[in-house]
Amino acid sequence: MTVLVTGGAGYIGSHMVLELLDAGERVIVLDNLSTGFRRVVPAGVPLIVGDTGDQVLVSRLIREHDVQAIIHFAAYLIVPESVRDPLKYYRNNTVNSRALIEAAISCSVKHFIFSSTCAVYGNPAKVAVSEDTPLLPISPYGSSKLMSEIILRDASKAYGLDYVSLRYFNVAGADPKGRAGQSTKDATQLIKVAVETAIGLRSKVEVFGTDYPTPDGTCIRDYIHVSDLCRAHLDALYYLRSGGQSLTLNCGYGRGFSVREVLDTVKRVSGVDFTVVNIGRRPGDPTQIVAETQLIRQTLGWQPRFDDLATIVSHALAWERTLVRQGPTIN
């Protein structure tokens, strides 16, 4: 049996491949390399360059490699970009996911794990959101993921595909062993931007909005280490294999940090007092959102290993220094 990881040459997907290999699983990767990197796929893992919307290709891979489970990461994920170009997001995140789900069902794939997002909650009235919090996305990115969740839910009921949808909160950090990390040029994630600034790759960090109704005026987010997130996917796979029913789960730590708190942590860990510039709000950014995590802990038995902001930052910083030593990134 093989696990197909879509987007497995990207940031989260590459960590998922490592998690699966460490657990003794057989893995293949499907990635169009639009944001991923060929070099992060470990030796011996087949990398097929192509799109998740290509049903002929996907069906062939499932049959040839005896794929019994799909972990679906391939997606665009930049909220401001989704506001500027929503059709790009609906095609890649929703239309292609629909095609992938259909191919999985037609080829009798047993298990499907979907990379969703807390953006489906929008700007919730309550800071800590549970899985039954009303779904009111405020960006095309969030809407594109919610549409995919609905497709997966309905397809599961009609055709019997077992699934787990994991609604991520803010993913950060890097593999503790230094094997992978966030390598995307001009990435927009706060911790990535801040550690790049700390080592001199950027001149400043821009803070988008300082007038939010929070203690220090900046947005609050629940940051989760990428390796803990991937462990949650592995736990979800084990859960489905043991006969677990389809469900949707939040994946965060249940504690929020403001933008200023994150930047202060990066400064402390790096020892660098870099420049921070305050500018206006960005469209599509909720004020504050934190996960309620009781369900994922109880259902999957998930236990985070790196639930500490300074640890997340230190791993991200170590990876940035590794990238500098490696030189320019080549796909």
Image: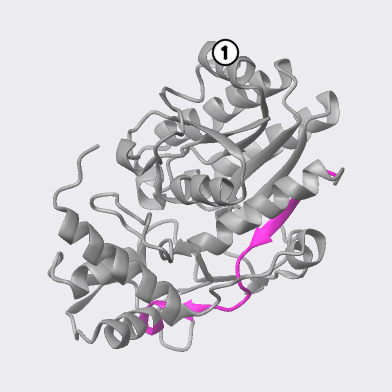
* Residue 10 percent location from the top left of the image: 40, 44
Residue 108's place in the image compared with 204, above or below, is above
Q: Quick one: label 1, few (<14), some, or many (20+) residues within 10 Å?
A: few
What's drawn in magenta, residue-wise? 245-261
Is 17 positioned to the left or the right of 190 in the image?
Answer: right
Name the residue rendered at 39%, 49% in the picture.
78
Residue at 24% x, 50% y: name it: 185
Q: Is residue 126 left or right of residue 190?
A: right
User: Magenta stretch: residue 247 in it?
Assistant: yes
Q: What is the tally of numbered marks visible in this picture?
A: 1
Relative image position of residue 276 (x, y in whole percent):
21, 78
Which secondary structure lies at badge 1?
A: helix
Q: Position of residue 266 (x, y in %)?
A: 32, 80
Residue that carries the numbered disc 1 in the rendered image: 60
* Foreground pick, 281 / 197: 197
Q: Nearer the viewer, residue 56 or 329?
A: 329
Q: Amino acid at mark 1?
A: Arg
Q: Position of residue 250 (x, y in %)?
A: 67, 60
Whether 20 is drawn above or below 51: the answer is below
Quadrant holding the N terminus: top right
In the image, residue 205 lies in the stretch drawn in magenta: no
